[in-house]
Each structure stands twice: as structure tokens, then as C-alpha cells.
């Protein structure tokens, strides 16, 4: 739970099977009222299955789903009317933009005048009022997704279910869409469940995060906490902790890994106990000269791989291999190339420690 927010939706002892095989199993998961929960995980982790169960279109083999403390399947029609959804594919019907946005209101029996008022409001809010009379088949991908989201908000849902709604559009369109969505959702505050595999989306939009791997819930918390403080190796690898080193505690706050001594401000494991030391690649700072600060080591550049705004480099220090993401401007200033000697520094606060039970 985030900041002790009240649970709006509750999942308990949920098991979903396909062909007799369990594809999703969650003991307990709460979705805080009025907040955005980013459901993240690799492909096949059960994210869309969870969304399908919450939509009541997939039937669990076991478990309880509650909305405001009441079983969601007690009155499925009533429950669904409290929710709206949008997907990676907009799924617009063969009619005008206005008719698509007003459709859920018409299905709920809202009178024509009120439908028009709400339709116009949400068309305007998503910047597509000028497209109101256009046929859905004449829309670009970004326009269609805006229509899909306007339709989802038009019924003023208590719960908003979103399955990768920003992944099917080009980068500039996606940026504008996310910006508008973030503003709208912060104003309207539906309880939002956003399925995404994108780290930036989770960090930018999520108040809370739930990470699924292999059909099971592995970690919950604030998105920054999940990405910076993973609970185990599998989570660390998914959230982009490119540096995961096996080591052990040698003294208070100090660990040894690959012949290198590393200090950490993280909670210590037992003296001599095996541990995993995790560092994000962007947390490694390179310099030509050493200054004797904590966790600074001499290293050799082994590979150089441009990656847009950063240069990813693999370095060797003793038996330790480090992966660093360095801003292009900094890399150019350093003038590094393969084979060069450099100093790599990691702040003790950036060394996350996981007790290694394996």
C-alpha cells in the first residue's frame, strides 16, 4: 500500500489456470483508492491475465476479488458499470469519433443531452474535438488511442483498467499522450491499474507498483523503491540492475565481490553471509583521475556501445565486470576508448544488498 491509502480493490488467494496449468497465482494484492498502480513484469508474467480477472472476463479457479469490500462477481453487470478499460489496440467501432466516445454512456442509458455534454467535454479534454465527425477508420494510431481514452473517461469510472495503452504509438505522439493522460488522471483520480512493461511509464505515472514474474507477485511498493531496491535477483534483472555481483559481508557495511571491496549503506546481512550486490548502470561514475573516495576502483574499458543519450560500457576491475551507462556528453569529455584505464566510482548509497539464499 502507498502511504496507507485505503484499498479500493482487493485480490486474495487468486489462482487462474489455463488447460490445467496455473498461469497466475497471487496471495494478496491491494489497489489503493484514487491512485495509479503500475502492474509491471516481463512478457508472460501474468499482467494481462490479472487485468482480465479484474474485468470479470476470466474466471479464476480460486480466489476472491473485492470492490469496496464486496465480491466483484456478486453482481457482474453492476461491477462492470463502475469500470472502464482501454487497451494497446483502441478497439473502436465502425462509427464516428463522437459516437465511439458516447457509446458507453448510451449503453448505460444516459439521456442524449447528457451524453453530448460529456462527449464534448472529453473530446475537448483529449484534444480531439476537431475530429468529432471523423470516422474511426480515418484516424491515425495516436488519434485512435486518444479516442479510446476519451471513451474510457466519459463514463466517469471509479476504476480504470489500462493494458499497454501507450505502446502502440510513435515516440513523439506517445510523449504528448502520456503528458495529457497524467494531467487528466491526477485531476479525476480514478483508481487506475496500468499494465506496462515500460520502466519510464511506471516511474512517471505510478503511485504504486506491483511486479509480476512467472505468474506470481514478487514485489510491491512505490515504483522508485521497486526499481532501486529489488527484492531478489529476478526482480533486479527485470528492473535493469545490470550489475548483480555475488559477494559476502566482510565487516560492518562492507562487502567483497570479485576481489573488490564495496561499502554500502543498505541494511547489512549477517557477517560472512552470501549476498547479491546490485548497482544500476547509470549510478556508476567514471573519471580519468582517482580521488580516493569510497568505492572507487581502477578499471579497464572492455566494450563501448552507444545507446541514444548514453554510452554503455563494460569495464573490468579485478575479477569484477561492471556495466556503466554514461551520458554521451560526459563520455566525449572523457575521450575514452576500448583498452583505456579509468576510475569507476559507486556511491555507497547506490549499492543495494540482497541476502542471497542460494
Image: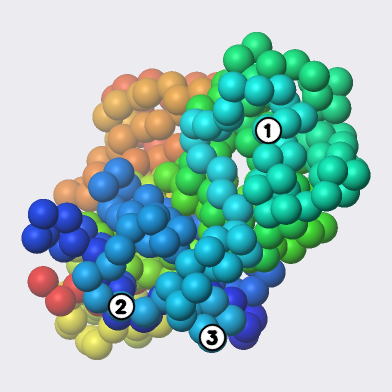
Picture coordinates of residue 195, whole percent (x, y): 47, 51
Q: Quadrant of residue 355?
A: bottom left
Q: x and y percent of residue 350 in the render?
A: 47, 62
* Residue at (63, 36) in percent of width and height: 148
Q: Is residue 309 visible?
A: no
Q: Which mark is residue 63?
A: 2
Q: Which quadrant holds residue 264?
A: bottom left
Please say if 130 is above or below 196.
above
Residue 321 in view, yes or no? yes
Q: Total label count?
A: 3
Which is nearer the eye, 155 or 180? 155
302 or 123, which is in the foreground?
Answer: 123
Please report whichever mark, 3 or 1, sits nearer to the chain's N-terminal start.
Answer: 3
Image position, residue 106 (x, y; %): 71, 45
**Of callouts 2 and 3, which one flags the residue occurring earlier in the amino acid sequence?**
2
Q: CA distance from mark 1 to mark 2?
A: 35 Å
Query: Is residue 135 found left or right of 12 in the rendered image?
Result: right
Residue assigned mark 1: 100
Check residue 320 in the rendering and tell me which mark sits there, or answer none. none
Give the x, y percent position of residue 234. Answer: 25, 58
The residue wearing badge 3 is 69
Q: From this view, report whether residue 298 is shown above or below residue 68.
A: above
Q: Quadrant of residue 12?
A: bottom left
* On screen, residue 188 above or below 316: below
- Considering only order in the chain, which callout, 2 or 1, is on the residue closer to the N terminus? 2
**SS class, disc 2:** strand
Could you tell me how far apart the alpha carbons at marks 2 and 3 are, in whole angstroms? 14 Å
User: Residue at position x 60%, y 15% from top?
Assistant: 137
As rendered, which of 319 and 102 lies closer to the eye? 102
Amino acid at each position: 500500500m502507498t502511504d496507507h491509502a485505503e484499498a479500493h480493490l482487493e485480490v486474495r488467494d487468486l489462482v487462474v489456470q489455463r488447460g490445467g496449468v496455473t498461469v497466475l497465482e497471487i496471495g494478496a494484492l491491494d489497489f489503493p483508492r484514487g491512485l495509479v498502480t503500475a502492474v509491471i513484469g516481463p512478457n508472460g508474467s501474468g499482467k494481462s491475465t490479472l487485468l482480465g480477472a479484474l474485468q470479470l472476463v476470466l474466471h479464476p479457479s480460486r480466489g476472491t476479488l473485492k470492490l469496496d469490500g464486496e465480491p466483484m462477481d456478486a453482481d457482474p453487470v453492476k461491477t462492470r458499470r463502475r469500470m472502464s478499460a482501454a487497451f494497446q489496440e483502441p478497439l473502436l467501432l465502425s462509427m464516428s469519433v463522437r459516437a465511439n466516445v458516447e457509446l458507453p454512456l448510451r449503453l448505460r442509458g444516459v439521456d442524449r443531452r447528457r451524453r453530448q455534454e460529456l462527449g464534448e467535454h472529453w473530446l475537448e479534454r483529449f484534444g480531439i474535438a476537431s475530429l468529432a465527425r471523423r470516422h474511426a477508420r480515418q484516424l491515425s494510431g495516436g488519434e485512435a488511442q486518444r479516442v479510446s481514452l476519451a471513451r474510457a473517461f466519459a463514463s466517469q469510472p471509479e476504476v480504470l483498467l489500462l493494458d499497454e495503452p501507450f505502446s502502440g504509438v510513435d515516440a513523439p505522439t506517445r510523449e504528448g499522450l502520456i503528458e495529457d493522460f497524467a494531467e487528466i488522471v491526477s485531476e479525476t483520480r480514478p483508481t487506475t491499474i496500468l499494465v506496462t512493461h515500460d520502466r519510464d511509464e511506471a516511474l512517471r505515472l505510478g503511485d504504486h507498483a506491483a511486479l509480476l514474474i512467472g505468474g506470481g507477485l514478487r514485489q510491491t511498493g512505490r515504483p522508485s523503491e521497486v526499481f532501486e531496491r529489488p527484492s531478489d535477483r529476478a526482480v533486479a534483472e527485470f528492473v535493469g540492475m545490470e550489475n548483480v555481483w555475488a559477494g559476502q559481508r566482510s565487516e560492518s557495511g562492507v562487502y567483497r565481490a570479485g576481489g573488490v571491496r564495496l561499502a554500502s549503506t543498505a541494511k547489512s546481512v549477517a557477517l560472512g553471509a552470501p549476498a547479491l550486490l546490485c548497482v544500476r548502470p547509470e549510478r556508476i561514475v567514471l573519471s580519468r583521475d582517482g580521488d580516493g573516495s569510497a568505492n572507487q576502483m581502477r578499471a579497464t574499458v572492455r566494450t563501448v556501445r552507444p545507446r541514444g543519450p548514453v554510452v554503455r560500457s563494460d569495464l573490468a576491475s579485478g575479477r569484477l565486470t561492471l556495466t556503466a551507462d554514461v551520458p554521451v556528453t560526459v563520455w566525449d569529455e572523457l575521450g575514452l576508448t576500448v583498452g583505456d584505464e579509468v576510475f569507476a566510482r559507486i556511491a555507497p548509497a547506490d549499492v543495494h544488498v540482497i541476502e542471497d539464499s542460494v
